[in-house]
């Protein structure tokens, strides 16, 4: 889990001693002292976004909190990286094992562009979407 709600949701945690020192040209929405003085409701809050985020937090707590989520993410990443690393070179991870993400698992197929097209086509037929990946890693 890396998203706390719908796209655009964000949480800012700011030390109190850092608030109130904004430049004169800082938009009011980025003046965290102003936000704190107004209980984070200086403007109309995004109700649906907050509602969905609350549901995500409730589920996170019900499922054991951050420690349990981290454990599950490590387990899932280990399954994926294990399949990639154990494929005999069929799948290739372009990321050094020391820097691998628990959230985004990029991989390529060693067989080249034609095999990747076939893989993506067959994956789509099975209901998998958006597997092409980022162009920086060959997607």
Image (cartoon, rainbow, N blue to C red):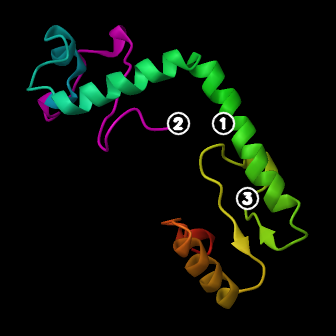
Q: Say left or right for 17 vs 24.
A: right
Q: Mark 2 points at which residue?
A: 1
Q: Given this view, does label 3 or label 2 mark the residue nearer the observer? A: 2
Q: Residues within 10 Å of mark 1 (few under 14, many from 20)?
A: some
Q: Where is residue 88 in the image (x, y as percent from the top left)?
A: 91, 69
Q: Are marks 1 and 2 in contact (CB under 8 Å)?
A: yes
Q: Do the residues labelled 3 and 2 touch (CB within 8 Å)?
A: no
Q: Name the residue under label 3.
A: 95
Q: Say left or right for 98 vs 134.
A: right
Point out the tag, 3 or 2, that comes first from the N-terminus: 2
- Assess whether residue 13 is covered by the magenta stretch: yes
Residue at the image position 69 percent from the left and 85 percent from the top: 115
Give the image quarter of residue 65: top right
Residue span colored magenta: 1-28
Q: How crowded is mark 3: few (under 14 residues within 10 Å), some or many (20 or more)?
A: few
Q: Is the magenta stretch mostly helix, strand or loop?
A: loop
- Assess whether residue 48 is covered by the magenta stretch: no
Secondary element at image label 1 = helix
Query: Could you give the CA–CA distance between mark 3 and mark 2, rounded to whole angstroms?
Result: 21 Å
């Amino acid at each position: 889990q890396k998203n706390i709600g719908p796209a655009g949701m964000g949480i800012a945690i700011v030390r109190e001693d850092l608030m109130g020192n904004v430049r004169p040209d800082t938009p009011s929405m980025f003046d965290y002292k102003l936000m704190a003085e107004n209980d984070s409701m200086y403007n109309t809050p995004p109700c649906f976004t907050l509602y969905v985020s609350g549901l995500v937090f409730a589920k996170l707590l019900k499922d054991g909190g951050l420690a349990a989520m981290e454990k599950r993410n490590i387990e899932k990443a280990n399954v994926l990286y294990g399949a990639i690393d154990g494929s005999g070179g069929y799948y290739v991870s372009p990321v050094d094992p020391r820097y691998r993400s628990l959230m985004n698992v990029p991989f390529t197929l060693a067989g080249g562009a034609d095999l990747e097209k076939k893989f993506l086509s067959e994956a789509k037929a099975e209901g998998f979407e958006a597997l092409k990946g980022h162009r920086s890693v060959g997607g």
